Image (cartoon, rainbow, N blue to C red):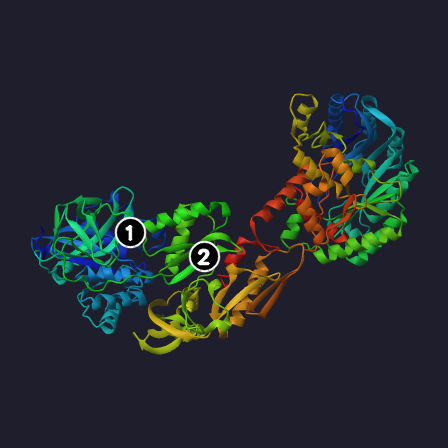
Amino acid sequence: MNNQSNGIYIHLPFCIKKCAYCDFVSYENQVEIAAAYVDNLLLEMEQYRGEQADTVYLGGGTPTALPPHLLVRILDGVKDCFNLADDSEITVETNPGTCQKETISALKKAGANRISLGAQTFVDTELSAIGRIHTAAQIKEAVLAIRAGGIQNISLDLMFSLPGQTEESLLYSLEELIALNPNHISCYSLTLCEGTPLYEAVSLSKTEVPDEESDRAMYELICGKLKESGFDRYEISNFAKKGYESRHNTKYWIRASYIGLGAAAHSFFGGRRFENPATFSDYEKVARGEQEREGTSLTEKDAMAEFMFLGLRMIKAGVSKKAFFSCFKKELDKVYKEQIARLCRLGLLEDAGDILRLTNRGVDVSNSVFCEFV
Amino acid sequence: MVNQEHIRNFSIIAHIDHGKSTLADRLLEKTGLLTEREMEAQVLDNMDLERERGITIKARAVRLLYRANDGEEYVLNLIDTPGHVDFNYEVSRSLAACEGALLVVDAAQGIEAQTLANTYLAIDHDLEIMPVINKIDLPAAQPEVVIGEIENIIGIPAEDAPRISAKNGIGIESVLEQIVSLIPPPKGDAKAPLKALIFDSFYDPYKGVIIYFRVKEGTLKRGDTIRLMATEKEFEVVELGYLHPNGFLKSEALSAGEVGYLTASIKNVSDTRVGDTITLANRPADAPLSGYKQVNPMVFCGIYPADGARYDDLRDALAKLQLNDASLSYEPETSVALGFGFRCGFLGLLHMEIIQERLEREYNLDLVTTAPSVVYKIKKTNGEELWISNPTNMPSANEILYMEEPMVKADIMTPTEFVGSVMELCQDRRGVYHNMTYIDTDRAQLHYDLPLNEIIYDFFDALKSRTRGYASFDYELAGYEKSDLVKLDILLNGDMVDALSFIVHNTKSYARGRKIAEKLKAAIPRQLFEIPIQAAIGNKIIARETVKAMRKDVLAKCYGGDITRKKKLLEKQKEGKKRMRQVGSVEVPQEAFMSVLKLDE
């Protein structure tokens, strides 16, 4: 039995329609098999019965593409199976057009206290360019419905570097977003993943995306605008009003343990990282305990690398040398002596006594910084 | 011993793909020594690489038996010659072993520069030239025009030349008959002191070095102790014989006029120089045969293993290649940018390419090569004289009194419509025009003096592209001339990259510097900081480009706790960096070193 309080991630790979940029595991038009899928989730949970947990995250896909009673069944199952802390953060992801007031109140009743809504942009042409099925007006309706349904802790997703997006149009989206007064905002630069329709369109020059310079200008615009609106950038892509940082996602960065349930869900549990298979049929075997999960135990070197490249994502907190020492019984300054010297010299890292953190420039090229530690 | 009257020693002169190998195959087939099944490949060309390029690099000699229409049986020794200007000296030694040469000309293409050069070489050696018109079956064939060309340019009668198709086996009989009737039998006194000409040698792992030779005077027997007159080495002949198309046939003795091979437990081809004279240790000839010279490498480049850990493999591979190729030279050198490698010397550009390809293909090595250089002569202000093949070793300008560079005499044959374009190219390459002769109304021959360093990069490619592939080109070395040369250095982020330095004529330094800086800018990926690329002569910067700092790298969403995938992406990115060379603070991809070799693209 694991003494740590775990995070629980539950993957619901169902969408009404997949977005043009999405390369996560999710399936269209499969909602009719959702009931059977939920049965498997409840089965899989049993493998962890009694574990402590203090965050729950229903992600997807679009969890609210499922009928509310199935979501309630899942949350009830979690409460029954796990030793859930009273003040647990329980988040459900949703998209405009799938979150009626009734759905939200049902979720609230079942324990959900945080909603993450995929807004992405408030310009309709940009929404359709990335294959979203809703309009800007529907985002506002969704926020009203969530509040009316009784959940006030709302996180909104925003994307930038979208086809056709300009700094002006981004500013407009930001203003609209801020006007909705969310508690938390996640901002992602559009990533073109191979195999997605948008990737194809851009490689065939059918669609154009803003260049690197505009991308950075947009990121700076976002940081500035959100800062003046009282949002604190606590992680590369995440901004929050004080006290509203995502407790669940933070577990990823600080290498706390989490249990992933459902197809393609990832876990970090008992010092091992492992993942569930992506197809429903293979997942069913895993849920029934008939098939092993793929995974690896981490060497000390792996664990130290993770400590660095995950910890540095937390822009303010950075990585603590003391925390590193208490974790590995080795001094961070010695283990990564050359890397740290080089990255500080290049102005990408800031060495502030116990804390090592990315500079603004380091944020722009964070992957190159992280590379130094793997 | 074969009666000299019944021996014919001959070579085939032809332009690449005018049908030399095909004709050789047909001759072998007709003389009954090869079945069709054995003819799968063109037997004279042994190496894959040669076959792919359609050229013959190492000379071979085969003995054919032919019963002529006069009822007599003749021994025909076919001595194959390399077909490229880099191997000019080897060609001349092969020709020196013959009494005649077949001049094979494509009935559709006519004479090419190289054919002409080799024909003149054969005439210089007093060989009987026997024209053969090949590919008469092609729709574009114009045998009469080509015959006129041969008579006009070379000045030998060609009206009776066999009109053949080697590919389809047409007219092969008439070629064999003319060989017997036109080419004179060898002369030479079988009782005189031995004089045999080495025209090729190669290393065999079982027998040691195998020497190909032509006995000019005297007789050589198995067990004789031979002396190689240039290298002054002595060996005992273990095996002696001649080449059957399918292998070696042993013999007890070979006499004046005959062609054959010998082995004598010789370990190194550098002992058996092409052109050297074999004589007997106990009864030596007074003087060696004329014409021997030591061939020196003309083109040099640095060859480095892409993976520094494979330095030993590269050294072993070069040693093995050198066993068979005395003209390949190499010595260890160190580059700040590329680590440990070798400075290698070659007869010419083709020779260099062949060696590089063999290292990569046969020895499975990934190479980084530096720009080829010629050998420059430097007179220093302190009176010292220097020969340098590596630009890095060039002294600073204030220590140099003057420099000299190697020159070549070049013959270029081109259709007349491209004359202007070819002249422009030669002028651009600092060529000095001599004269132009018209071969016929459609074709002209241009004579230029050109600096060797202007033709070792891409001259041939440029010539081909300007003439839609119709021009042909031949050159011979023509000594050294004073020249206004400078060393151009490349600096990345302020650090000089020794492997990218080269020597160039002052008038061309700015253009070349700019071009290289542009090439490098395209080849070096953006990095975490801005990288100035500078081309400099001494302390003077003559060109500058900048690789801008990387603006951002992808902030992929790290979703649902999939850390494993994130880590894999980081590892992949890191792996990509490992494949690059660290030059000072800059990571330079291997391709960047090679990109500067292709300046005209």
| A223 to the left or right of B423 | right
Viewer-proximal residue among B168 and B27: B27
Residue bearing mark 1 = B269
Is residue A2 visible to us here? yes
Residue A264 location in percent, x, y?
69, 32
Residue A45 location in percent, x, y?
76, 24
Circle 1: residue type: Val
Task: Tell me the quadrant of the picture where the N terminus of chain A can be found.
Answer: top right
- Give me the chain letter of mark 2: B
Residue at x-position 86% and y-position 51%:
A227
Viewer-proximal residue among B585 and B346: B585
- Give me the chain letter of mark 1: B
Viewer-proximal residue among A211 and B390: B390
Q: Is residue A345 above or below residue B250?
A: below
Task: Tell me the quadrant of the picture where the C terminus of chain A can be found.
Answer: top right
Q: CA distance from mark 2 to mark 1?
A: 23 Å
Residue A60 location in percent, x, y?
75, 36
Picture quadrant of residue B437: bottom left
| B181 to the left or right of B101 | left
Mark sitting on residue B302: 2
